Amino acid sequence: MSEESVSPEKPQAPEASAHIRSISAEGTLSDGVGRRKTSVARVRLTPGAGRFSINGREIKEYFRRPRLVDEVNRPFSVTGTTGRFDCDCAVKGSGLASQAGAVRLAISRALVSWEAEWRPALSTEGLLTRDSRMVERKKYGIRGARRRPQWTKR
């Protein structure tokens, strides 16, 4: 009996490179998921001219406040990639401010999955940190999460 028939070797997995570029058939660069409060954002970056679509609408049409538009575009300005990627976002849940935070985190994660060298710049700006604050639940016997009924002595 030969050794090959006794213990067949398992195929070796390819080694991971320094940075991962996941390019699919349609040319997608990278995906990212971001969460903030109860909103969830899924982002897909492709090379392009800076087109931005959120739930099928333009960014300035979806986030009407300029502060929210600036917050969403912050990962691109930190990495110096403004106008280099087309961004297609699907976001749901919560309000506009938390949706903007979720989209910002998803874009940051997608940029890091595209180019690992951008991680330190995004990390020092706090763009890769998930804001874990959630709404505290209402408790029984009180009006909200913490508001107690007024105490009466007599």
Image (cartoon, rainbow, N blue to C red):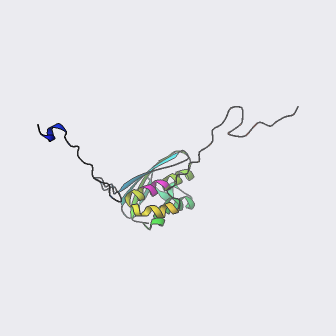
| Closer-to-camera residue (10/71) | 10
Q: Is residue 146 above or below residue 130?
A: above
Quarter of the picture holding the N terminus: top left
Predominant SS of the magenta segment: helix
Quarter of the picture holding the C terminus: top right
User: Seen in the image, is 131 located left or right of residue 118?
Assistant: right
x, y percentage for residue 115? 38, 61
Q: Is residue 54 one of those drawn in magenta?
A: no
Q: Is residue 145 above or below residue 82?
A: above
One can see residue 73 in this view = no
x, y percentage for residue 37? 56, 46
Residue for point 27% across, 52% down: 14
x, y percentage for residue 116? 40, 60
Determine the image quadrant of residue 10: top left
Residue for point 71% across, 36% down: 143
User: Which segment did they paint magenta?
Assistant: 105-109
One can see residue 41 in this view = yes
User: Seen in the image, is 150 located left or right of residue 22?
Assistant: right
* Residue located farthest toward the left when viewing the structure as drawn: 1
Residue for point 48% across, 66% down: 78
| Closer-to-camera residue (94/147) | 147
* Residue located farthest toward the right when viewing the structure as drawn: 154
x, y percentage for residue 4? 15, 41
Determine the image quadrant of residue 109: bottom left
User: Seen in the image, is 14 located left or right of residue 120?
Assistant: left
